[in-house]
């Protein structure tokens, strides 16, 4: 038995080696070595106190805070590795003493220790080391988004109102403004909300704040929002001091705009139903024609009220004082409602004036009181307008019995070739 075991031991050893070699070849064929690249791996700096304890600070340069890692391992291992498994670290202990800007990046995959090779690109973290600095800045609150309809942002108050910021001297010196940005989308009530801290330089550009520290602590930055409501308030004029010339009478006023939006608290707005303008603002005498006046009503608003029209020019209201002869009536008719008769094909009609045409008619008081102009009752005949150009054409008005035009009315029109082949106004 012993002789059988020791007989031809050299051949047996060779067979064993061959078997191991064959097994290795087969395994490598089934599970070969391969490479795979993983992007966006965040680099973690360890032992930063080596730089920061003496009072210095550092910034990571050239976007080297993330790297691409190439991993070489068996395919079965590579198929299991995920981006989150890969750790990239730059130990400040290994800072290049000559450049004081390069730190080698070490890559590790703890879950697969000893079963891979890995390299980072770039393979060094580039840093800038400089003196540290701390400074206190006031915080300005601002908002983004659109409040709920009928509401406006009133006061924004940051909490805290100041902030202490520490970091590289060059970064701290570049700070021009510190802003607390709060979202007021859909806001309709007073509230204190979380805000985003944004730093701006002298050029209005946002400063990267990843390498600086502040004293906001766990409570963070907040903004107290005070909301205001809006209300549409009619404007009413006293017309008692409007006087006309002999043979004329005052027939009314039109104002534009007829109401204004004012802003205030709910309690303030509840006290205002209209804006009353005294008679002195429209005081006139011997008027014999319709007259326009612009009245600044800013001084008649409640002291607390704000409006969308507030400006250096105040809050202007345009008032048209309508004056008519006795036995006449002035009716306004929109230019764009005038009917076009015999309009040439493929031409566009535009008027020399916009808005409303004033048509003065005469008749008995009884007929005038009930008189109105219906759609289609005012027209112009373009039978003599055949080519591009400007024309003065008479207005034709269809009137009921007992009503006549006070004067002939001409309007200026311009004919231009139309691209779409349709007549317009």
Image (spheres, helix red, strand yellow):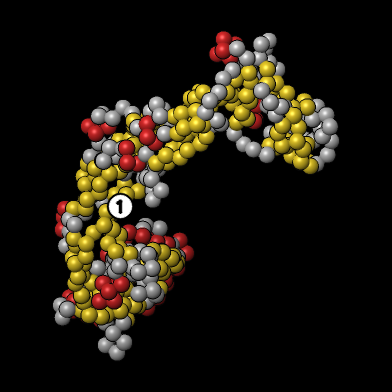
Residue, disc 1: 142
Residue 78 quadrant: bottom left
Give the percent coordinates (x, y) of residue 270. Answer: 26, 29
- Indicate the secondary structure of the residue bearing disc 1: strand
Q: Is residue 110 left or right of residue 34?
A: left
- If the image is split into quadrants, where does the C terminus sit? top right
Most extreme residue toward the bottom is 98
Q: Is residue 414 left or right of residue 227?
A: right
Residue 167 quadrant: bottom left
Give the residue drawn at x 45%, y 40%: 294
Q: Is residue 410 above or below residue 123?
A: above
The answer to whether residue 7 of the structure is visible from this angle is no
Q: Is residue 322 above or below residue 171?
A: above
Give the residue drawn at x 37%, y 76%: 123
Front in this rendered view, residue 147 or 154: 154
The answer to whether residue 388 of the structure is visible from this angle is yes
Front in this rendered view, residue 353 or 111: 353
Q: Is residue 367 above or below residue 358?
A: above
Give the percent coordinates (x, y) of residue 75. Answer: 42, 62
Give the percent coordinates (x, y) of residue 329. Answer: 58, 21
Front in this rendered view, residue 269 or 421: 269
Give the percent coordinates (x, y) of residue 141. Answer: 27, 54
- If the image is split into quadrants, where does the N terminus sit? bottom left
Front in this rendered view, residue 117 or 240: 240
Residue 297 quadrant: top left
Give the residue drawn at x 51%, y 23%: 249
């Amino acid at each position: 038995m012993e002789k059988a075991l020791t007989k031809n031991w050299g051949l047996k050893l060779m067979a064993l080696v061959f078997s191991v070699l064959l097994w290795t070849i087969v395994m490598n064929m089934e599970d070969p070595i391969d490479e795979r690249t993983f992007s966006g791996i965040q680099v973690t700096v360890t032992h930063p106190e080596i730089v920061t304890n003496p009072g210095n600070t550092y910034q990571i340069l050239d976007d080297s805070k993330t790297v691409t890692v190439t991993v070489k391992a068996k395919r079965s291992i590579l198929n299991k590795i995920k981006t989150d498994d890969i750790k990239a670290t730059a130990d400040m202990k290994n800072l290049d003493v000559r450049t004081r800007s390069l730190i080698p990046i070490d890559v590790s995959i703890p879950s697969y220790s000893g079963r891979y090779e890995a390299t980072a690109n770039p393979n060094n973290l580039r840093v800038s080391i400089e003196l540290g600095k701390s400074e206190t800045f006031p915080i300005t609150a601002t908002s983004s988004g659109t409040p709920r309809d009928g509401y406006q942002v009133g006061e924004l108050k940051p909490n805290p109102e100041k902030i202490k910021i520490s970091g590289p001297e060059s970064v701290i010196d570049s700070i021009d403004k510190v802003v607390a940005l709060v979202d007021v989308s859909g806001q309709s009530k007073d509230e204190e909300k979380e805000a985003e801290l944004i730093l701006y330089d002298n050029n209005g550009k946002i400063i990267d704040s990843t390498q600086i520290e502040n004293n906001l602590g766990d409570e963070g930055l907040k903004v107290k929002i005070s909301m205001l409501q809006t209300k549409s308030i009619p404007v009413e004029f006293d017309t008692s001091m409007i006087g006309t010339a002999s043979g004329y009478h005052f027939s009314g006023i039109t104002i534009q705009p007829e109401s204004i939006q004012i802003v205030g608290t709910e309690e303030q707005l509840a006290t205002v139903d209209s804006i009353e303008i005294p008679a002195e603002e429209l005081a006139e005498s011997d008027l014999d024609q319709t007259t326009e006046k612009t009245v600044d009503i800013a001084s008649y608003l409640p002291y607390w009220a704000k409006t969308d029209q507030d400006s250096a020019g105040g809050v202007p209201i345009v008032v048209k004082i309508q004056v008519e002869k006795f036995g006449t009536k002035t009716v306004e008719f929109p230019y764009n409602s005038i009917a076009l008769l015999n309009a040439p094909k493929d031409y566009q009609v535009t008027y020399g004036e916009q808005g409303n045409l004033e048509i003065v008619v005469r008749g008995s008081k009884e007929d005038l009181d009930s008189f109105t102009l219906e759609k289609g009752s005012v027209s112009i005949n373009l039978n003599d307008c055949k080519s591009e150009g400007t024309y003065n054409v008479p207005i034709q008005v269809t009137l009921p019995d007992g009503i006549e035009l006070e004067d002939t009315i001409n309007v200026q029109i311009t004919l231009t070739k139309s691209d779409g082949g349709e007549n317009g106004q």
